[in-house]
Amino acid sequence: MSFQFLPALLLFPVFLVLAFLLSRNRKAASQTYSGPFLFQSVSGSGGARTAVLLQWAAILLLCIALARPQQGFERLPEAGEGVDIIITLDVSGSMDQTDYYPSRLAAAKKAALTFIDGRPNDRIGLVIYADRPRTLCPPTFDHATLERFVQSAELGSLPDGTAIGAGLTVAAKGFNYSQTSKRVVVLISDGEDTSSLVDPITVAQAINTIHGDSLRVYTVAIGKPLSEDGLGLDRETLSYIAELNGGRLFNVESPEELDEVYSAIDSLEASTLPAEGLFVYRDSYMFFLIWGMILLTVSNIMKYRFFKIVGE
């Protein structure tokens, strides 16, 4: 609970001090004056003391109401807020190589999990691809479920091969229901396209035509460049895909550099939402105001009853 006008809470101790000083003055005056109009009362009775306590409780509640207490309720971002991100992960057989400890795939998954933890207010999804692509999780705020899908991405879950173009196509289609103006694909690959029906360059051009500046593609190159026999990592294609769609190519040579890639993407695609979350604040002063008025009324009724002048 927070208070919009915190100084109002200081009124209660001020009233206590004033009441104490006034009671001392009254006591001193009664000691110096005696006459036919100094009446006895039953103010020392238990009922009278209860009335006084209720009166002070009422004053405290009214001071709290005046301070305007509020309660915050965390809410999820609405459509159009934040950044929608789809991680597109290569799960072809070559991702099992151990030049990235303990393997290329394990290092890529670990870095992805760290990235997801760092963006709690963004929708993030996961697409995997080998010979064909598969959407494991559409963009979601349910990052706990998303992380389980990341951990479950394994080699052999799809026929072996590398369909970069198909993986990129499915990732772009994953934004069909996105209403935010900021969308990002993070495409991770360690090979050249061998299985797509449409080559990755054509797919990248189509994405640029359809989405324009609203969708950026960052490509992450893991592994060794193309060798003489045409096998290996096609950095040239990955670089073209990224540059055409407002992103950039990251050349990664170690697991530590994978973390740096996601940190760089974090800075390039900063969320428009606060990291501490979104809160809706609602006034809750009515509870204190109503009960304060009730206690004040009850105390006045009790005082009228117990502070009557003797002989009246």
Image (cartoon, helix red, strand yellow):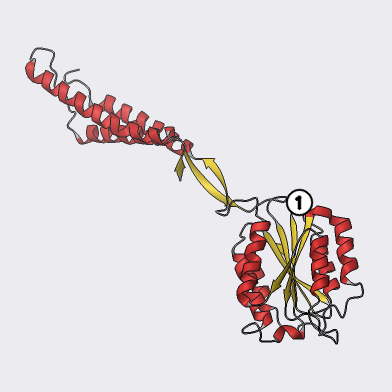
Residue 143 shows in the view: no
Q: Nearer the viewer, residue 188 or 120?
A: 188
Establish if 308 lies above or below 158: above
Q: Picture quarter containing residue 140?
A: bottom right
Compared across the picture, whether 237 is left or right of 46 comes to right
Q: Position of residue 254 (x, y in %)?
A: 64, 77
The amino acid pointed to by label 1 is: Ser
Give residue 305's quadrant in the image: top left
163 left or right of 15 in image = right
Q: Nearer the viewer, residue 275 or 174?
A: 275
Determine the residue positioned at 80% across, 53% down.
213
Q: Pointer 1: residues within 10 angstroms few (<14), some, or many (20+)?
A: some
Q: Is residue 171 above or below residue 106?
A: above
Of all residues, the one furthest to the front in this rendering is: 228
Q: Report x, y in % for residue 302.
A: 29, 29
- Counting from the top left corner in percent of width and height, residue 164 is at 82, 74
Indicate the quadrant where residue 42 lies. Answer: top left
Which one is nearer the viewer's eye here, 293 or 241?
241
Question: Would residue 175 be visible to someone looking at this image?
Answer: yes
x 34%, y 34%: residue: 10
Q: Secondary structure at mark 1?
A: loop
Camera-side residue of 245 and 298: 245
Q: For the image shown, how many numbered marks are present on the structure?
A: 1
Q: Quadrant of the C terminus?
A: top left
Residue that carries the numbered disc 1 in the rendered image = 181
Q: Residue at x 76, y 83 (%)?
A: 157
Residue that lies at the very extreme toward the top in this rendered image: 36
Residue 259 percent location from the top left of the image: 62, 70
